[in-house]
């Protein structure tokens, strides 16, 4: 669907597709969060959106060359992820799905760790206790349950609304429009509401759940999905990085201060495929893709920055950084050794188990039967 078809739904947009900044009167409460940003913040947003786009393109190429088992592109969703990611506080925790490469960038995750997971080398490789960015959840909707439980624990521990910024916490979980049809998402909304948990549900509505349109999954806008459970919602223009930042910042602050859960629907568009195993030309028109490509979130922010007097040198610098990132990723992936086969058995249980040991012994004997031992 086009933006015009969504025009009857109240939507927070602070940056127009032409890059003009403005705050509609009904959304004035969000302006204060933009006023606190500096030019350096705006440049950081663009730099990381550009980095996310280049990382995505390089990962897709690596998968096509057989270096990754699968890739999950997020082209078109950079504004929603970078804006919301930078709105998360220093003590807050993030529970992603499997497409949040941009949010990972905002929390210092080594991008190579994500590629290793899609290569089958590890299960993520970063420590959520250190990064507060939890591991990717491949099974649809499970991260929402984990986030709800974590947020309930934060409330039970009394780490909400104490007034101490070093103690108070909030939780954010990311999910797609398709995941909203999962039963555990409804259960999570209910548990979050009745326990007044400090949790923000951030839905990236990219309008396609693999080959199913959002309109085939819901009769009401997704921002209203939580209302029946007691979770208020709001829709934002998901291609507007400033709206993503301001609205997420407000509701994370509110949750941390005891206001309970909230739901944000970021209306965006998945320009690429669902994954590299998907062919979107089988189920959607090119004209629709072209419509949304013309509303590219990177181009929108670039127009805004140029209006602020940012020169070509900055954009050239971002392009060069992308080239360097691409080279580094390719070199590291192509030189990456296969991990020892025993690694897949190491962390099944915290203590050794005879059945696991038996399976490892069988595999080692099987591998030894090949010429060269592998």
Image (cartoon, grey):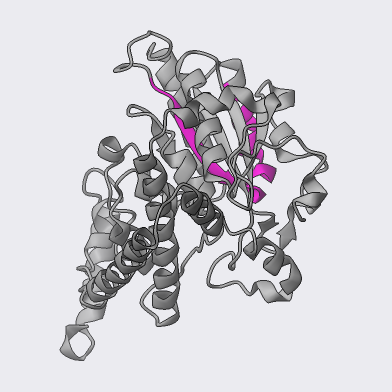
Relative height, residue 14 to residue 335 (above, below): above
Residue drawn where x is 53% and y is 62% of the image = 75
Q: Number of numbered discs present?
A: 0
The x and y percentages for residue 116 are 31, 64
Relative height, residue 119 to residue 171 (above, below): below
- In this view of the protein, which residue sits in the foreground, 184 or 215? 215
**View extreme (bottom): residue:** 371
The x and y percentages for residue 245 are 50, 37
Report whether residue 264 is seen: yes
**View extreme (top): residue:** 162
The x and y percentages for residue 97 are 49, 48
The stretch drawn in magenta includes residue 175: yes
Residue drawn where x is 48% and y is 33% of the image = 172
**View extreme (front): residue:** 309
Residue drawn where x is 31% and y is 68% of the image = 320
Give the magenta part as a residue range. 169-192
The x and y percentages for residue 190 are 64, 25
State the quadrant of the N terminus.
Answer: bottom right
Report whether residue 190 is seen: no
State the quadrant of the C terminus.
Answer: bottom left
**Relative to residue 89, is residue 285 drawn left or right?**
right
Residue drawn where x is 33% and y is 11% of the image = 164
The stretch drawn in magenta includes residue 73: no
Q: Quadrant of residue 29?
A: top right
**Relative to residue 38, is residue 122 drawn left or right?**
left
**View extreme (left): residue:** 372
């Amino acid at each position: 669907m086009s933006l015009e078809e969504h025009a009857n739904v109240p939507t927070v947009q602070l940056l127009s597709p032409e890059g003009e900044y403005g705050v509609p009167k009904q959304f004035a409460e969000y302006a204060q969060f933009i006023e606190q940003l500096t030019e350096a913040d705006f440049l950081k947003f663009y730099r990381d959106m550009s980095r996310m786009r280049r990382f995505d393109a390089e990962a897709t190429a690596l998968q096509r060359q057989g270096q990754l088992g699968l890739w999950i592109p997020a082209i078109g969703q950079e504004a929603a992820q970078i804006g919301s990611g930078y709105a998360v506080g220093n003590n807050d925790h993030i529970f992603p799905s499997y497409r949040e490469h941009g949010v990972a960038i905002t929390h210092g995750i080594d991008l190579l760790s994500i590629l290793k997971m899609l290569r089958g080398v590890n299960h993520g490789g970063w420590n959520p206790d250190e990064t507060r960015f939890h591991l990717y959840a491949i099974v649809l909707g499970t991260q929402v349950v984990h986030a709800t439980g974590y947020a309930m624990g934060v409330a039970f521990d009394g780490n909400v609304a104490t007034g101490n910024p070093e103690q108070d916490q909030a939780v954010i979980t990311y999910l797609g429009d398709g995941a909203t049809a999962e039963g555990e998402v409804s259960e999570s909304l209910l548990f979050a509401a009745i326990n007044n948990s400090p949790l923000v549900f951030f839905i990236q509505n990219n309008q396609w759940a693999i080959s199913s349109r959002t309109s085939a999954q819901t009769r009401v806008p997704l921002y209203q999905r939580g209302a029946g459970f007691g979770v208020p919602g709001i829709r934002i223009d998901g291609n507007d990085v400033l709206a993503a930042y301001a609205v997420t910042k407000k509701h994370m602050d509110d949750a941390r201060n005891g206001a309970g859960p909230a739901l944000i629907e970021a209306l965006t568009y998945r320009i690429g495929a669902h994954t590299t195993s998907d062919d979107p030309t089988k189920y959607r028109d090119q004209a629709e893709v072209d419509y949304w490509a013309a509303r590219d979130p990177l181009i929108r922010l670039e127009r805004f920055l140029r209006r602020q007097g940012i020169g070509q040198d900055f954009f050239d610098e971002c392009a060069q950084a992308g080239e360097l990132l691409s080279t580094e990723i390719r070199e590291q992936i192509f030189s990456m050794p296969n991990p020892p086969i025993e690694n897949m058995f190491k962390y099944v249980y915290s203590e050794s188990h005879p059945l696991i040991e038996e399976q490892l012994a069988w595999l080692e004997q099987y591998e030894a039967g090949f010429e060269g031992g592998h």
